Image (cartoon, helix red, strand yellow):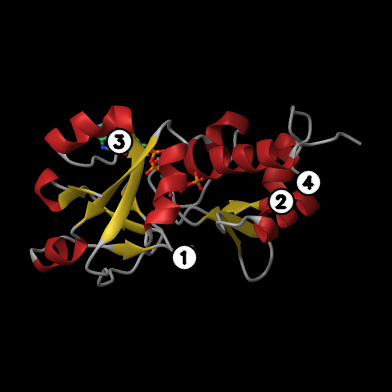
Amino acid sequence: EVMVNKVSASKFLSLLLRHKPEEVGLVLDPDGWAEIDQIVERTSSGKIPLTRSLIEELTRTSEKQRFKISEDGTKIRANQGHSVKVELGLVAAVPPEVLYHGTATRFLESILAEGLKSGNRNHVHLSRDSETAVRVGQRHGKPVVLEVLSGRMHREGASFFLSDNGVWLTESVQAKFLALL
Ligand code: HQG
C-alpha cells in the first residue's frame, strides 16, 4: 500500500476540484461535482492515489470543511476557492458590518492602490474574524489584515455570498472600502 501524506493529498484533491480537473482527465459537472469513482480510477496509478476511504477521511477531517460529499455518497465538490467556472448555487446574504482580508505585506501597496481583485479565483475571499484572516495571510508571507467595510459596500449595491464552509465571497473590493487594521 502506498503511504500518502494527508496534507499533500488534500491539496491534490483541492487542485482537482477547484483548479485543474483536467490534470487527471476528471470532469466536473456545471455545479462543480465530480464522481468519486472517477477520481479514484483516474488517480490510482499516479503519485497520489486518492482512494474512496482517503477521500472520505479528508472530507471528514478538513478543519476548514473544504469539501462536501453528496447525500448519496457518489459525488464530491469543493465548497469554495474555485478558479474553474462552477455554479455553486451561492445565495446572496447580508454581510456583517465589517469583514477581514488576510494578505501578505508585499501586496499591500498594490491592494491599497487598486483594491482587492479576485485574480485567478472566482471571488475575493473574506473572513469573519481577524484571527482567521491572519492565517489566510500567512500562506503568502508576512501577514497583514485589512478591514473591509462590507456593510457599506452592501448598502451601496455589492453582492456578498456565504459559502457552505463559512467563507464570505464578493466580486471585488474597491480601495475606498479598505482600512488597515
Ligand atoms: C492578493 C484559502 C495585489 C490577495 C483561504 C491574496 C481562502 C492582491 C492573493 C482562500 C490584489 C490571492 C483564498 C491586488 C488581491 N494587488 N495582490 N490588487 N488583490 N491580492 O490564494 O484570499 O486553504 O487566491 O490579498 O482560506 O489568500 O485553499 O486568495 O493574498 O479562503 O482552502 O492576491 O484560500 O483556503 O491569493 O485565499 P489567493 P486568498 P484553502
Q: Earlier in the sequence, mark 2 or mark 3?
A: 2
Callout 4: 10 Å neighbours few (<14), some, many (20+)? some
Residue farthest along the front direction in this orientation:
181
Q: Is mark 3 within 8 Å of ligand 1?
A: yes
Of the pair 171 and 70, the residue shown nearer to us? 171
Callout 3: 10 Å neighbours few (<14), some, many (20+)? few
Residue drawn at (57%, 39%), measured in percent from left and top? 16
Amino acid under disc 4: Thr
What is the quadrant of residue 84 in the picture? top left
C-alpha gap between disc 4 and disc 2: 6 Å
Which label lies toward us, 4 or 1?
1
Q: Which mark is residue 51?
A: 4
Identify the residue under disc 3. Answer: 119
Identify the residue under disc 2. Answer: 55
**Residue 55 in sight from this viewpoint:** yes
Identify the residue under disc 1. Answer: 164
C-alpha gap between disc 2 and disc 1: 18 Å
Amino acid under disc 3: Gly
* Disc 2, SS: helix
Q: Is residue 95 left or right of residue 67?
A: left
Residue contact at pointers 3 and 1, CB within 8 angstroms: no
Q: Earlier in the sequence, mark 3 or mark 1?
A: 3
What is the quadrant of residue 41 in the picture? top right
